Amino acid sequence: MHFDLVDLRLFTHVAEAESLTGGSNRACLSTAAASTRIKSLEEQLGSRLFYRERKGVKLTPAGTQLLRHARAILRQVEHVKSEFSDLTSDAMGHLRIFANTTAVTEFMPEVLSRFLADRPGITIDLEEKMTRDIVRGVQEGAADLGVVAGAIASKGLEVIPFSYDRLVVVTPMGHPLTVCSHVSFEQTLEYQHIGLHEGSTLLKFLQDQVSDLGKTLPLRIKVFGFESACRMIEAGVGIGILPKSTALRYQLTQKLALVELEEDWAQRERSMILRELEALPTVGQELVKAIAAHEGFTPVPIGKQGTRPDVSSTAGDSDYSPAING
């Protein structure tokens, strides 16, 4: 049996694109050459890897298994390259991060801007994903690092809490809810809501909460991004449930009122998830440190979860106090 990294990269690209043409384009190969390589892989493994469908391809059970191994091999190759590049003056490396809506739109741009400023050889893929897809992506090796909020099923992963934030009700000035300092989530369902786009982690989270109440979320309109949501709220189109840190920032320039939610779930812990901290390349460990030390976070109190691990190489001297849960 013989296949090289080009084969594994091509196979991974085709699987992720769910298209032979799309995968071959990503791999910079012709469709014919890609097809030949995939067929060769299937012959060597003695298993069909893809179901050919009219609109693309889908992984077979054997293909799903190979994808897990291929991703692990390719990530390990990247880590080896990164470790050796640290011996040169111009460090090279690549990281892939899956993160929720708040992270992608709020603090990760600033974190990455500072982090990459003096690391010209480092490239990063940052993708917005649903929480369940973030967890699965890290577990399967599709991502080096995940950034999530709230409780997660973290079997087989290291979880590093680094801060927390609250969800609050955001309303236009003079809204009936503003006479209260705290309201229940159920009370907000009497009013039309402004929601984020389909697929956002926050929208899915709120839909889960309202489902537990046996009701539906009264969505008036869905928008892309917190800025658009706040503009709609200011204009009186509806109210919204947003992270408090986000709402406070937009409140500086827009006429918005904030009302606290009574539910315990309104306070959500932000965490980084990864398979193994020490297995990350040096640049990955440095990014963990950079995220944890970002200014403006409300840090997780020492001892809040578990025992403080020995991650001095990543924690630095900040107020950040990580706790690892396996």
Image: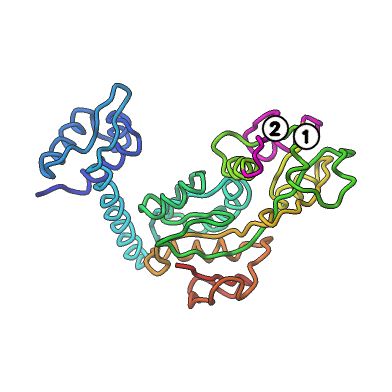
Q: Could you tell me which residue is drawn at 32 percent across and 55 percent down?
A: 75
At label 1, the amino acid type is Tyr
Q: Which residue is mark 2?
A: 218
Task: Name the residue: 53% across, 58% down.
Answer: 115
Relative vertical location of residue 111 with respect to residue 308 in this rendering, above or below: above
Magenta span includes 232: yes
Q: Tag 1 or tag 2, which sits nearer the N-term?
A: 1
User: Outermost residue, front direction?
Assistant: 214
Which residue shows up at 57% across the image and 52% down it? 108
Q: Nearer the viewer, residue 18 or 303?
A: 303
Q: Nearer the viewer, residue 281 or 241?
A: 241
Residue 225 position in % (x across, y down): 64, 38
Residue 253 vertical position relative to residue 236 in the rendered view, above or below: below
Can you identify the residue that label 1 sits on?
Answer: 191
What element does badge 1 sit on? loop
Quadrant placement of the C terminus:
bottom left
Q: Are marks 2 and 1 in contact (CB under 8 Å)?
A: yes
Q: Which residues are magenta?
A: 212-237
